[in-house]
Image: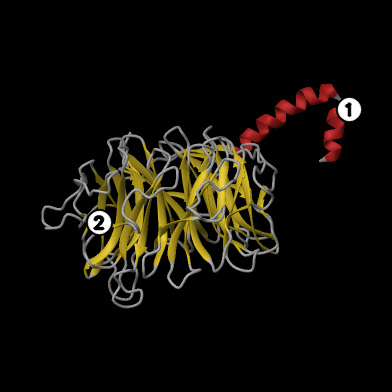
Amino acid sequence: MRHFKYILNCYPLLQFWICPILAILSLLIVIDTSSAEWSSSATQNLPLCTAENEQRFPVLIADGQGGTIVAWSDARHANRDIFAQRVSTTGDMHWNANGIPICDLPSSQSWPLIVNDTMGGAILVWGDTRHGNQDSYAQHIDANGNKLWDIEGVPVCTHPTLQDDLNAIADSKGGVIVVWEDWRNGNQDIYAQRIDSTGKPLWEANGVPVYKGDGDQYDPVLIADGQGGAIFAWWDISTPDWNIFAQRLSAEGKPLWNPVDSAEGTPIPVCVATGNQGAPVAVSDEKGGVFFVWSDYRNDPNFYTRAQLYAQHITAQGSAVWEKDGIPLCELQVNQQQPDCIPDGSGGFIVTWWDERDIFADIYAQRINANGEPLWHDENLQLQKGGIPVCTEGGVQRLPQLVPTDEAGAIVYWLDYREDFGDSTEDAIYAQRLDADGKPLWEINGIPVCSAPKAQITPRAIPTRANAAIIVWGDARGADEDIYIQRIPAEAK
């Protein structure tokens, strides 16, 4: 490559002709728009990648044109690499069949994350073992799939100890903020890094501590604060009980929240109730603050047999709005798990979860206003805080997730085992649309997104035009796991 650049520098006329030719060839290589369309069949769907060996853990963002950019972990080269594809609003593949490589070094790259760059492209983050232990790297691609940073990615953290459980968000300035679990201090702490749109790290090399303290901290989550910084939460086992704590870092990576009479950098308690709390979820209050929802075992009669969902509202200044240690979202004393939340557009949030009030896990939802009051009520249930049923079909339903619609409602999608009988496991993906009052707008108990044979796993979705969603997942209907995608409803314009 050095010799080629030397020739071009020495012969300007040759450079005048070769550079445009190479640019055109580059576009021809990447932009291989394959004609396709969204399937109307829940047993067929649209294959996104069916390359040799398995593809797993797809993630996606909107491309700003009604389509999506998808990334996934890919084993076509016998190790784990990161590949990506762009899909148009009509279901056409913009890039090469089966995707383009984002990072395909001989080492293993896994668990990709993706955030929007605000310009039609994407920033991707992944775990990477090129140096032996697991580090983290990132890459920026434009709308045509061209790499904008170093060809092999830029380092997020390459400290010689383990980094794990990555999470990432757009920083609202064209860059990305990444958080992870980190073992550099002999126990598991929480660290973060911010990278700008050019690939330059803005905080200390290898990240700044969100919290480094006694014991271990797990499952970090984060949301952007709208000022170039972020609000973080995690569950902490530095005390006999597992509790929820939070911290806000400025655009410069400095801690902004601090309890009264505590040392600088001390996180604020979200919930320190007796019993254990874990798996926090964060959603913006759209005023610079945050709502946290978590699984709470304070009323568990045994040991990890029955969690309830609790929530707390924290202002941009780090003050708790609701009662100490949070409020229950569902007053039924039954196991409630896997919450997911989105803003409701009016200062509150919509939450979905599965619970076991009818023995098998079903899907429920609730809308909570800024005062912590439930807005949706089931006419058949004499409870103020019981939620509304989304799916109570036979069998088990798990992993409910939400995307917003254009009309202040939501689309809920989930893994569904209503056809799971005997010795075979028949995973499926179903979805339901709720209006702003919590009323179902599609068939009772949802419509099938995918009911193909064998397993469908790790569905992820984005909202798209006309109150629809694009959903992507790992799929085992073939000889190995592939990536499939579907717009729901398929006929949405």
- 203 vs 10, nearest the viewer: 203
Residue behind mark 2? 364
Residue located at (83% from left, 29% from top):
8
In this view, the mark in front (2 or 1): 2
Residue found at x 48% / y 50%? 222
User: Which quarter of the figure has residue 371?
Assistant: top left
Query: Percent x, y for residue 66?
Result: 41, 34
Reply above or below: 19 against 272. above
Q: Position of residue 287 (x, y in %)?
A: 39, 38
Q: Residues within 10 Å of mark 1 (few under 14, many from 20)?
A: few
Asked whether, in this view, residue 24 is left or right of residue 378, the answer is right
Q: Nearer the viewer, residue 57 or 323?
A: 323
Quadrant housing residue 308: bottom left
Give the x, y percent position of residue 307: 32, 67
Q: Which mark is residue 10?
A: 1
Can I make out residue 450 in this image?
no
CB within 8 Å, label 2 to label 1: no
Q: How is the image coloured?
A: secondary structure
Q: Quadrant of the C terminus?
A: top left
Left or right side of 394 for 181? right
Near-viewer residue (402 or 77): 402
* SS type, badge 2: strand
